[in-house]
Image (spheres, helix red, strand yellow):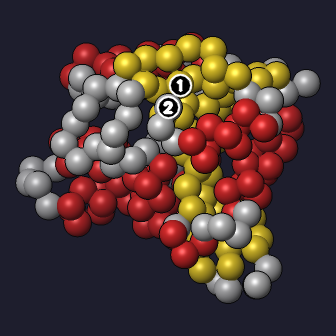
Amino acid sequence: MSEIKIRPAKRTDAADLAILDNLAGHSIPLMFWRELTDNDRIEDALALGRDRLSENDGFYNWKKGRVAIEDDLIIGMSMSYIMPEPDEESEAIKQNSVSFKPVFELYDQCTDHWFVDALAVYPSGQRKGVGKLLFDDSIALGKESGAEVMSLVVEDTNEVAYTLYRAYGFEVVAQKDFVPFEGAREINEWLLMSRQLS
């Protein structure tokens, strides 16, 4: 097996970050991007996601990303940062998107936490320990950030991720009902999981 390395994301990684962000979010990002486009084309929605992630000034952009590389190809990514206080954009999303509202209500409980927003691995990179490498990297970054608590949101039916996070000492601290949307997989609840970093 080739060596897998973790490095900071680059602006030129934005297309992979968009695809992997959508994988991590189980198509919720794609739904959001489609709402912002004038048509229903998936390609246009993904292009919008890429453009948003390639911005230099936006909050949720390539600068928050870390990527796993194997044989010069990106096979996985994570996006993590210190969670800011709710802003006008997040409040607008809660008001305008029924499916997003429960997730953002959980986000609101994570102000000043080191927050893992997304972690995903392409199918070709799975079963190689890539997710664990990226998660270890996120924990190390969280400790360096000075945050006292690390948090994330996961769906209750994602048993692989839930088991991994429990093994790292994360506990469920809150949950919200999942609001179905077109193309969504079967999920019952969103779970907010947290642990101390110190």
Give the number of the disc on residue 78: none
Name the front one of labels 1 and 2.
2
Q: Label 2 crowding class (10 Å Cα cut-off): few <14, some 14-19, many 20+?
A: some
Structural crowding at the residue carrying mark 1, measured as other residues with C-alpha within 10 Å and reported as few (<14), some (14–19) or many (≥20): many
Could you tell me which secondary element the residue under label 2 belongs to?
Answer: loop
Amino acid type indicated by mark 1: Leu
Q: Looking at the picture, how far across and down is residue 14, in whole percent?
A: 47, 63
Please say if 50 is above or below 99.
below
- Give residue 99's position: percent from left, percent from top: 28, 28
Q: Residue 83's spot in the image, x, y percent? A: 61, 26
- Could you say which quadrant of the image residue 69 lies in? bottom right
Q: Which residue does the image show at 38% across and 34% down from the upper left? A: 187
Instruction: Identify the image quadrant of the N terminus.
Output: bottom right
Reading the chain from its start, which is encountered first: label 1 or label 2? 2
Tag 1 secondary structure: strand
- The residue that mark 1 highlights is 191
- Front-most of 33 and 170? 170
Residue pictured at 50% horizontal, 17% vertical? 175
Residue drawn at 43 percent across, 66 percent down = 15
In the image, is 168 to the left or to the right of 14? right
The image shows residue 160 at horizontal and vertical percentages of 61, 47
Tag 1 and tag 2, C-beta contact below 8 Å: yes
Name the image quarter holding the C terminus: top right
Q: Is residue 72 left or right of residue 34?
A: right
Image mark count: 2
The residue drawn where x is 38% and y is 27% is: 188
Given the image, on which type of amino acid does mark 2 rest? Asp
Residue 72 visible somewhere in the drawing? yes
Against 178, residue 129 (above or below) is: below
Q: Which residue is mark 2?
A: 156
On the question of residue 147 being in view, the answer is: no
